[in-house]
């Protein structure tokens, strides 16, 4: 019994030593090592598609790992988790914050590019607020001017063209509305503005056709003919010869109709004058 009484305190002391040793080992891990482990855990979660779990790990790092050298990568990965989840607005916000906070890390160029790409992927609805389109245009424009030697320049320019098509589509939408409402004067003005502002847009062909039709509906045949001549001389988006022929036929028909109306009106006037005599 005495031996047992001696053993119990010794065992307790041993356990206390082990506990203290464990705590000591825990304390002996530097903050950097703890942060490294958390970052690795976040990467492991992302590799398994557990992006929400990865965000939790990174958010834990936010308050504990400042100044350790790991936050540059951690905050980039935070944006990546939203991008992978296709949460485009959150992704763009996080990439934007990253580029502003870390303007010259190995991840900054990628963050700047994906900032624009996330904005591009925000659902686009014609006729709605186009803020995300304008932001994406600015984002890619900044990327192209900042990273002139980037391997992603061609890709960024591709998205700039597609975003400009969206802007053009919005502007054309207004002109088309006037045309469908048979407000041909307003349609002509809007379509002419559209063609000046978006000479390379995908909708140039249909806009040209509706502009010519608007002038013809207004009886402005000479103006319609001048437009066709300008389209034919355009070197940016050359006029399809077949379409040019169709325009010429329409203009010729309208001239014939106009001449007949003039002759009919002249005949009526002569008749009235004869009756008056």
Image: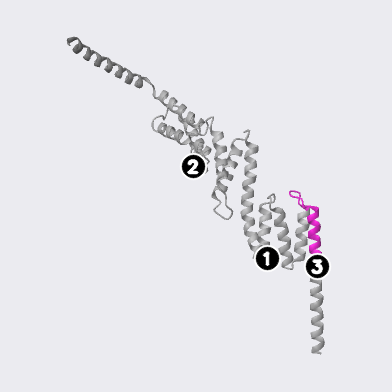
The residue shown at (62%, 39%) is 156
67, above or below 213, in the image: above
Pick out the residue farthest to the bottom: 277
Query: Could you tell me which residue is drawn at 39 percent across and 33 percent down?
Result: 63
| Closer mark to the observer between disc 1 and disc 2 | 2
Instruction: Give how far across and how far down residue 224 sits, in percent.
Output: 75, 62
| Segment colored magenta | 233-254
Who is closer to the viewer here, 153 or 104? 153
**Residue linked to disc 1:** 184
Q: Nearer the viewer, residue 144 or 90?
A: 90
Q: State the residue position of label 2.
A: 90
Q: Quadrant of residue 260?
A: bottom right
Residue lying furthest left in this view?
Answer: 2
Q: Quadrant of residue 22?
A: top left
Is 216 placed above or below 158 here?
below
**Distance from label 1 to label 2 (Cα)?**
44 Å
User: Label 1, label 3: how many angstroms apart (C-alpha)?
Assistant: 18 Å
> Is 46 drawn above or below residue 202 in the view shown?
above
Which marked residue is nearer to the observer: mark 2 or mark 3? 2
Marked residue nearer the N-terminal end (1 or 3): 1
Label 3 secondary element: helix
Q: Earlier in the sequence, mark 1 or mark 2?
A: 2
Determine the secondary structure under disc 1: helix
Query: Is disc 2 placed on a helix, strand or loop?
Result: helix
- Circle 3 residue: 255
Q: Callout 2 environment at 10 Å: few (<14), some (14 to 19), or many (20+)?
A: some
């Amino acid at each position: 019994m005495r031996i047992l009484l001696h053993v119990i305190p010794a065992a307790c002391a041993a356990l206390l030593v082990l506990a203290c040793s464990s705590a000591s080992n825990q304390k002996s891990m530097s903050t950097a090592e703890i942060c490294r482990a958390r970052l690795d855990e976040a990467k492991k979660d992302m590799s398994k598609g557990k992006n929400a779990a990865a965000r939790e790990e990174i958010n834990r790092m936010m308050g504990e790992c400042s100044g350790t050298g790991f936050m540059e990568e951690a905050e980039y990965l935070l944006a990546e988790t939203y991008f992978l989840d296709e949460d485009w607005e959150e992704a763009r916000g996080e990439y934007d914050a990253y580029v502003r906070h870390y303007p010259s890390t190995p991840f900054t160029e990628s963050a700047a590019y994906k900032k624009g790409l996330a904005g591009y992927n925000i659902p686009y609805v014609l006729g709605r607020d186009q803020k995300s389109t304008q932001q994406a245009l600015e984002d890619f424009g900044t990327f192209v001017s900042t990273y002139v030697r980037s391997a992603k320049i061609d890709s960024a320019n591709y998205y700039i063209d597609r975003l400009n098509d969206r802007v053009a589509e919005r502007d054309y939408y207004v002109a088309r509305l006037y045309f469908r409402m048979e407000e041909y004067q307003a349609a002509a003005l809007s379509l002419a503005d559209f063609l000046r502002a978006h000479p390379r847009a995908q909708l140039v062909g249909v806009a040209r056709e509706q502009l010519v039709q608007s002038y013809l509906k207004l009886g402005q045949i000479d103006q319609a003919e001048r437009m066709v001549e300008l389209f034919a001389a355009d070197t940016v988006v050359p006029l399809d010869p077949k379409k040019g022929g169709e325009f010429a036929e329409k203009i010729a028909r309208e001239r014939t109709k106009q001449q007949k109306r003039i002759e009919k009106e002249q005949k009526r006037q002569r008749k009235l004058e004869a009756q008056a005599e």
